Amino acid sequence: MSGSNEKLDRAVAAAGEVFLRYGYVRTTMGDIAKAAGMSRAALYLLFPGKEQAFAAATMALAVRRLDEIRAVVASCDGLRDKLTAGCVMLLVRVLELQQTTPDARDMDDLAFPVVREIYAMFEAFFAEIITRSAPAPLIPAGTAARALLYGARGLREVADTPGSYTALIEAHVALISDGIYGAGASAVTRS
């Protein structure tokens, strides 16, 4: 049984590397099989098609990234710092990947169901942070998390460097956190 899990893990990791390099359209099952060091027939035993390999690889990368973000956010103080750290770690990394490997855009394309599922996972993560940090938010945690995540994602379109994107995310988080607490909340409460 562990040999089977080992093969699956190897195939998922290889698929992630190949999809990041070539994108969804240009990647073939043969490319993934070659990168995983297995036959196409063996790969098809693990995944019935490219869609399933893409979903597994993309989700595996996202789960690993979420674990990294959780570790960093746990060491942050205050809602604003937690939200900023999470958004920057998630979204600036996507921008950097897209700038260095343009075909990696597919792994952040909301047209793919798995990408929408991943964004829902991150939305829930941010809503959890908001709920724990702001027990009585003026904006419901889920709504604030959605506005935070998709608003910050949209700012990527106008950012020309990771540094400018980080600055835009920081401003966006400040606006969202002010909205969560209300304009009359003290700076100490909002930190």
Image (tube, rainbow, N blue to C red):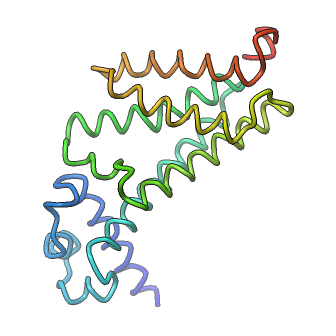
Q: Nearer the viewer, residue 134 or 182?
A: 182
Residue 68 pos. (x, y %): 52, 45
* Residue 47, image quadrant: bottom left
The relative height of residue 185 versus residue 176 in the rendered view (above or below) is above
* Residue 44, image quadrant: bottom left
The relative height of residue 78 versus residue 100 in the rendered view (above or below) is above
Residue 178 pos. (x, y %): 70, 17
Residue drawn at (14%, 75%), measured in percent from left and top? 30
Q: Nearer the viewer, residue 184 or 48?
A: 184
Residue 77 pos. (x, y %): 71, 25
Residue 168 pos. (x, y %): 45, 18
**In this view, which residue lies farthest toward the right?**
136
In the picture provided, is 136 more to the left or to the right than 13? right
The relative height of residue 176 versus residue 136 in the rendered view (above or below) is above
Residue drawn at (34%, 23%), measured in percent from left and top? 162
In the picture provided, is 172 more to the left or to the right than 17? right
Q: Nearer the viewer, residue 114 or 164?
A: 114
Count of marks, rendered view: 0
The C terminus sits in image quarter: top right
The relative height of residue 54 versus residue 123 in the rendered view (above or below) is below
Residue drawn at (76%, 8%), measured in percent from left and top? 187
In the picture provided, is 164 more to the left or to the right than 117? left
* Residue 136, image quadrant: top right
Residue drawn at (50%, 49%), measured in percent from left and top? 119
